[in-house]
Image (spheres, grey):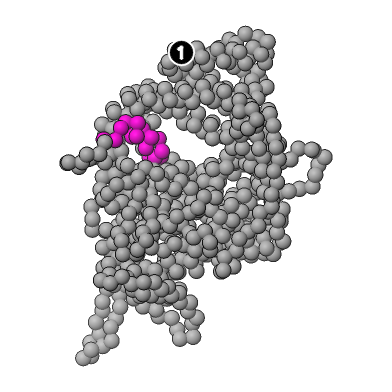
């Protein structure tokens, strides 16, 4: 059991921007906390059943009194050898009307949608709602960061499309406005239009939800528009405008695949595209009495560039825009992509802010495992250790590396390393979210109860790892240093003898280990970490050199990145979490985060679930 649980309780007040919406941090935190507290299940409306959904009433009730408890393990300041647990509880409280307004913000940010009518933009009094692919991406990262046991919603990730790559635009901490620079607009526009012009396939209507979403993720859907000119000398002529798109479709795409938090913010980014000369208006055939919302942005115009002092974007149903010659040049549609592996799952790309808009954008990412030093390059050649780190972080590379290890009868090395890595994260932090209910006579807080259940689960994981990989004659026994094996055996013999009074027999039964405390688990983790280091070194020196020569690895060299980096140096650090899920100060830029679950599932056949019955 945890040895000490100091309690800390705080109330959280939401910051509101000048536009009247909550800050992105509060929006994402509260959205994910609400979803974790709900039981997503089947709901019926209009004679149809919608799985993995929730109702207006359920959301309003939970938001009225929502608690998020987070427990962190660490050394006792007074006795560093002893592990203690600190639990912090954050309480969200709001009226029903405020709860409905908050859900409207979730809809505006494209985190949830109306299950009956996905085109509806209003959060209704008696509605049924489900998570969007973008909402699932944000939720997955929140669960991972906070160590939340989300078994009750794991089925949602398996049965609905997930946004694999989400582009985050960083914001000013003082007012939560997106920091606009040429580097940011370049990164956003390239993601917006895709690596190649995205003309939808003819069979788009027959595709399932997964395939349809995959088509949209390639970039904004384009079309050709034929226009008739005024008759000249009695004859009318027609012209074909290529690379066109509807204004409304552009707003929807920006809301679905980036961190913009509503159509208003999306329209401002589109207006920046106009200002930078990347898109231009083709036509707006609305009637004279039709309403029109026009967004205008202003900024400096460097001499000799295509950037204007202001840009205007019309948010009307009839407005049609097209990609300009400058836009096509910036998109690099005509440039052959460089050899590079898929983006990293945690540090895919980062655009550092330039102080002046006229500077070329610098996109930052981890060094590619396939990048070869140029002639005369005096840089140190990338080591196999660096390559292995990159392989482990990238879902596509990791999957192929696992296949390679399996064929060479040493898959257990990677499996052990990953399971211990996950175990270390779960040991350090755990969180829970639930709607507060009336007291049932228990003196334990929800945070304490969650931590006790979490501790029991950790014991199970710890000895499942031991019995699978380290026990004598185990199913996937590792080939590790003899001294390390003896040290691990001696420690378990000492602890188990003290707990049970019986000599250690080489295997651990889970009921025997139930009395393990947090400090003893910490000591076991330290031994696991040393074995991890041994296994990592073994994979780096023996397996990686062979793997990078295989056809399956070389094929990935043609796998282009969503954000093409410019030639130059790329530091090995970049943001690992989206804004709103960290308290650290943001810096201007843009970066991509990758959904682990979506990436791993992309190689599997999508299940026939996740839509109404």
Helix, strand or loop at mark 1: helix
Q: Is residue 490 visible?
A: yes
Quadrant for the N terminus in the image: top right
Which quarter of the picture shows residue 70? top right
Asked whether residue 183 is drawn in magenta, I would say: no
| Residue at screen point 59% across, 37% down | 429
Point out residue 428 in the picture as x, y percentages from the top left corner: 57, 35
Q: Is residue 443 left or right of residue 478?
A: right
Residue at the image position 63 percent from the left and 59 percent from the top? 14
Residue lying farthest to the front in this orientation? 78
| Most foreground residue, 236 or 301 | 301
Residue at 68% in and 29% down: 3
Stretch of the chain drawn in magenta: 381-396
- Vertical position of residue 211 compared to residue 381: above or below: below
Q: Nearer the viewer, residue 493 or 599?
A: 493
Q: Along the line of sight, which residue is nearer the eye, 53 or 335? A: 335
Number of numbered callouts drawn = 1
Residue ranking furthest to the right: 441
Dominant secondary structure of the magenta stretch? helix
List x then y, in percent, for residue 443.
79, 38
Q: Which residue is mark 1?
A: 483
Residue 53 visible in the displayed image = no
Direction top: furthest residue = 503
Instruction: Name the spot of residue 93 as percent of width and height, x first.
Output: 70, 56
> Tag 1: Cα neighbours inside 10 Å, few (<14), some, or many (≥20)?
few
Please name whichever residue, 542 or 566, is drawn nearer the observer in this view of the structure.
566
- Residue 441 image offset from top left, x and y in percent: 82, 40
Residue occupying image coordinates x 62% and y 16%: 495
């Amino acid at each position: 059991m945890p040895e000490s649980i100091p309690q800390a309780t705080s109330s959280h007040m939401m910051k509101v921007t000048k536009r009247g919406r909550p800050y992105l941090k509060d929006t994402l935190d509260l959205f994910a906390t609400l979803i974790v507290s709900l039981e997503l299940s089947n709901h019926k409306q209009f004679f149809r059943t919608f799985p993995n959904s929730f109702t207006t009433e359920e959301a309003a009730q939970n938001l009225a009194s929502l608690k998020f408890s987070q427990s962190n393990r660490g050394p006792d300041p007074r006795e560093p050898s002893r592990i203690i647990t600190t639990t912090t509880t954050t309480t969200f409280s709001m009226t029903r009307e405020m709860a409905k307004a908050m859900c409207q913000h979730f809809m505006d940010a494209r985190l949830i949608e109306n299950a009956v009518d996905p085109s509806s933009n209003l959060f209704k009094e008696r509605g049924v709602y489900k998570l969007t692919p973008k909402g699932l991406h944000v939720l997955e990262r929140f669960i991972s960061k906070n160590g939340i046991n989300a078994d009750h919603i794991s089925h949602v990730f398996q049965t609905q499309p997930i946004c694999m790559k989400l582009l985050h635009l960083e914001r000013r901490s003082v007012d939560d406005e997106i920091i606009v620079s040429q580097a940011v607009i370049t990164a956003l526009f390239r993601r917006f239009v895709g690596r190649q012009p995205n003309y939808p396939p003819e069979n788009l209507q027959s595709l399932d939800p997964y395939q349809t979403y995959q088509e949209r993720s390639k970039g904004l859907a384009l079309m050709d528009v034929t226009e008739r000119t005024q008759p000249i000398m009695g004859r009318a002529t027609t012209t074909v405008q290529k690379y066109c798109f509807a204004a409304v479709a552009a707003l929807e795409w920006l809301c679905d695949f980036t961190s913009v938090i509503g159509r208003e913010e999306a329209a401002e980014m589109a207006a920046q595209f106009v200002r930078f000369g990347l898109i231009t208006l083709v036509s707006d055939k609305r009637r004279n009495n039709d309403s029109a919302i026009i967004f205008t942005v202003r900024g400096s115009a460097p001499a000799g560039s295509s950037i204007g002092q202001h840009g205007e974007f019309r948010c009307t149903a009839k407005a049609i825009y097209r990609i300009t010659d400058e836009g096509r040049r910036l998109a690099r549609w005509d440039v052959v992509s460089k050899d590079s592996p898929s983006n990293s799952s945690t540090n895919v790309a980062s655009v550092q802010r330039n102080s002046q808009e006229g500077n070329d954008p610098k996109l930052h990412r981890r060094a590619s495992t396939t990048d070869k030093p140029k002639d005369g390059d005096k840089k140190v050649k990338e080591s196999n250790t660096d390559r292995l780190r990159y392989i482990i972080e990238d879902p596509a590379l990791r999957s192929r590396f696992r296949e390679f290890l399996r064929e060479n009868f040493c898959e257990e090395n990677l499996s052990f390393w990953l399971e211990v890595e996950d175990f270390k994260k779960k040991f350090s932090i755990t969180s829970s979210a639930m709607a507060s209910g009336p007291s049932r006579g228990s003196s334990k807080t929800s945070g304490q109860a969650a931590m006790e259940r979490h501790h029991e689960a950790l014991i199970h994981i710890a000895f499942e790892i031991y019995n699978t990989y380290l026990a004598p004659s185990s199913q996937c026994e590792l080939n590790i240093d003899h001294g390390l094996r003896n040290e691990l055996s001696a420690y378990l013999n000492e602890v188990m003898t003290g707990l049970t009074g019986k000599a250690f027999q080489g295997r651990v039964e889970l009921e025997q280990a139930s009395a393990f405390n947090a400090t003893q688990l910490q000591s076991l983790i330290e031994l696991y970490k040393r074995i991890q280091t041994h296994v990592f070194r073994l994979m780096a020196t023996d397996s990686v050199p062979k793997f990078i020569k295989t056809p399956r690895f070389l094929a990935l060299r043609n796998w282009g990145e969503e954000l093409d980096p410019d030639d130059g140096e790329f530091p090995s650090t970049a943001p690992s979490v989206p804004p709103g899920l960290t308290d650290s100060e943001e810096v201007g830029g843009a970066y991509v985060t990758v959904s682990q679950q979506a990436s791993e599932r992309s190689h599997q056949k999508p299940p026939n679930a996740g839509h109404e019955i």
